[in-house]
Amino acid sequence: MPQTIAVLDFGSQYTQVIARRIRECQVYSKIYHYTTKPEQLQADGVVGIILSGGPSSVFSKKAPIPDRGIFELGVPVLGICYGIQLFGHLLGGKAAKSDHREYGHGTLTIKKPGRLFAGLPKKLRVWNSHGDKVIELPPGFKAIGTTENSPFAAIEDIKRNFYGIQFHPEVFHSEHGVDVIRNFLVGVCGAKQEWTTKDFIAHAVKEIRAKVGKSRVILGLSGGVDSSVAAALIHKAIGKQLTCVFVDNGLLRKGEREAVIDLYQKHFHIDLRVADSGKLFLKKLKGVSDPEQKRKIIGRTFVEVFEKSLKSIGKAEFLAQGTLYPDVIESVAIGNNPAALIKSHHNVGGLPERMKLKLLEPLRELFKDEVRQVGSALGLPREVVWRQPFPGPGLGVRVLGAISADQLEILRNADAILQEEMMESGWYWKVWQSFCVFLPVKSVGVVGDERNYSYVIAVRVVESIDAMTADWTRLPYDLLQKISSRITNEVRGVSRVVLDISSKPPATIEWE
């Protein structure tokens, strides 16, 4: 394992962003709960510590306070926002509530570049988000940067290699923010930039082989980014010992089943078993219109089909999943901070406990962007690696209300046209998601000389970074016209196409 930079999480909405920026600098980062003992950090080979920001005030009775022993480990420490206030509060200085809360852009004037600001301009536009500030420096510290409202916006203790900054270098709004982080990692901590895709793959392959031995591994392949990369990586490690199960639930996009078979079975020569279960899913979904009920039925049926498929495969000891690092970070659930809630992982809900299989999660150290890099390095096509998010229940939550085979076919054909035009125009790669929704209402149209009373298709195209917020994409009018014209002319059963121009919030990205 490469050298580790520990990010102590104090509930900041940017904690994962800090960890990602560190990895962008090719240095391995790991997020820890703020109460983590110094002995644990030392055992993990931590060469530097970053104290994240957070929503709390150091004056609060329930303020998250770390073990003071972290300051005695002899490794460099960088305090960001709440972190710099901890320096003032815990190391003999003084923090106080600011008369003017700094939120948004500000100007950092660098008084002394030192190692933290080496090679950077004397003035930086930075992003602030704080209500407290340091008003008296702890012994050993000196001010190296100021903002409009804070004479101690950046501080350093050269002897102990402690640095504090009031702004957030990890967000895109801060100029040269990544350079500040890199200066801390390489210039201060002396960390080696050895966290690369090539090194990760070599390490993961070695680890998979050691863990699995000669055992059989089963993986539920959805065709999405995570399960696809997990399948390619595990197959590189153990070859024929991997068997993938692809459940065709009848709720897939047009040509999806054929594309999965062609790529994984014919190209990668993976042992792929296809469970043709569309009729079973539709039978169980008949007459069900409640979105949550539909999701539960689809989830339960998937487990049922998956388990049945395994009986024909034979004995296996491992169940592989495309679990990512954000799915397994337990340190982020601090207080009631809504930004810190753990995202529940539901690739194959409930299977490990019921089937008594050992879990194999080769991607659990990676963020999404790193998974895409690994996928590209393993030879997966761009269409898979950069595929837009697709809901687990598939088109089941894009047909509003009760589902029928005819409605699914209408939606499938309309969505195929949308994807074709998005790909051809290049817009597919620029947006977060683009999809069609089937509306169970009919509208009057004209086909030839006859009135046509048919269904409505809604087109949803959004821009986002993490799906927490999203805005509707302003596609060119000519492209929208072509999409609408093709859908109404080529898809039987559609008389009208509407565009969803709702942002999240208040709307959600999916309709159900």
Image (cartoon, rainbow, N blue to C red):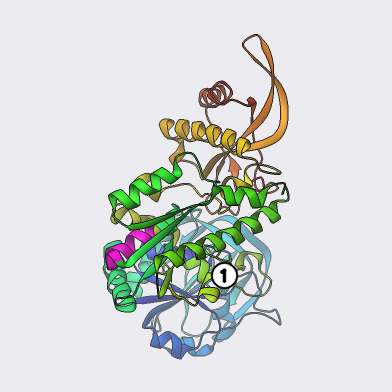
Q: How many marks can you see?
A: 1
Report if residue 236 lies within the magenta region: yes
- The x and y percentages for residue 336 are 69, 71
Image: 288 above or below 178? above
Task: State which quadrant residue 316 falls in.
Answer: bottom left
On whether residue 88 falls in the magenta region, the answer is: no
Residue 253, image x, y percentages: 50, 42
- Going by the picture, which residue comes out furthest to the front? 312
* Residue 93 seen in the current view: yes
Label 1 neighbourhood size at 10 Å, few (<14), some (14-19), many (20+)? Answer: few
Residue name at image x 59 percent, y 33 percent: 410
SS at badge 1: loop
Please give the residue where the numbered disc 1 appears in the rendered image: 350
Image location of residue 434, percent across then percent down = 53, 40
Q: Is residue 433 above or below residue 499?
A: below
Q: Main secondary structure of the magenta part?
A: helix
In front of the other: 76 or 2 = 2
The answer to whether residue 157 of the structure is visible from this angle is no
Left/right of residue 137 with respect to residue 508 in the rendered view: left
Q: Nearer the viewer, residue 445 or 171?
A: 445
Please state the extent of the stretch shown in magenta in the rendering.
229-240
Q: Where does the N terminus fall, quadrant-wise?
A: bottom left
Residue 197 in percent (x, y) is at 30, 62
Q: Residue at x 63, y 75 (%)?
A: 334
Q: In this rendering, would 90 be left or right of 235?
A: right
Whether 143 is drawn above or below 308: the answer is below
The kind of residue tagged 1 is: Gly
State the residue at coordinates (59%, 25%): 492
User: Along the line of sight, which residue is nearer the eye, 336 or 354?
Assistant: 354
Above or below, 48 against 146 in this view is: below
| Residue 320 falls left or right of residue 3 | right
